[in-house]
Image (cartoon, rainbow, N blue to C red):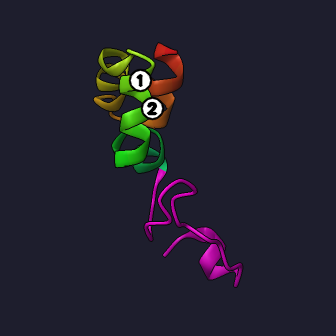
Amino acid sequence: MAVWARRGVVVDTRCVVCLRFDGDYGHTFFKCENVKKCWRLLDTKDIRSELGSCQSRKEVVAKI
């Protein structure tokens, strides 16, 4: 259970792009089908792939 949930805070975890429930940062920025389309249109799918293979958010930020 997340810290917020234990404290009684309701957090909407839906993806802001596709509204899929339980969308984490990995889904929202790298796995969401709508976002993948944007990466392709920007011709940056190789960058998406590299960042998507990172093991943590910290690693993603370090690569950026």
Q: In the rendering, at what x and y percent does residue 20 appear?
A: 43, 66
Q: Give neighbour class at mark 2: few <14, some 14-19, many 20+ (Cα, 10 Å).
A: few
Which residue is rendered at x = 70% and y = 80% of the image?
7
Looking at the image, which residue sits at the far front?
41
**Which quadrant holds residue 50?**
top left
Which residue is rendered at x = 45% and y = 18% of the image?
42
Residue assigned mark 1: 41
Q: In the rendering, at what x and y percent does residue 1 appear?
A: 48, 76
The CA distance from mark 1 to mark 2 is: 5 Å
Q: In the rendering, at what x and y percent does residue 4 appear?
A: 65, 71
User: What type is the residue that disc 1 sits on?
Assistant: Leu
Q: In the rendering, at what x and y percent does residue 41 appear?
A: 41, 23
Residue 41 belongs to magenta span: no
Q: Main secondary structure of the magenta part?
A: loop
Please give the range of residues in magenta: 1-24
Disc number for residue 38: 2
Pointer 1 with pointer 2, Cβ within 8 A:
yes
Determine whether, in the image, residue 38 is placed left or right of residue 46. right
* Disc 1 secondary structure class: helix
**Which quadrant holds residue 13?**
bottom right
Determine whether, in the image, residue 13 is placed left or right of residue 7. left
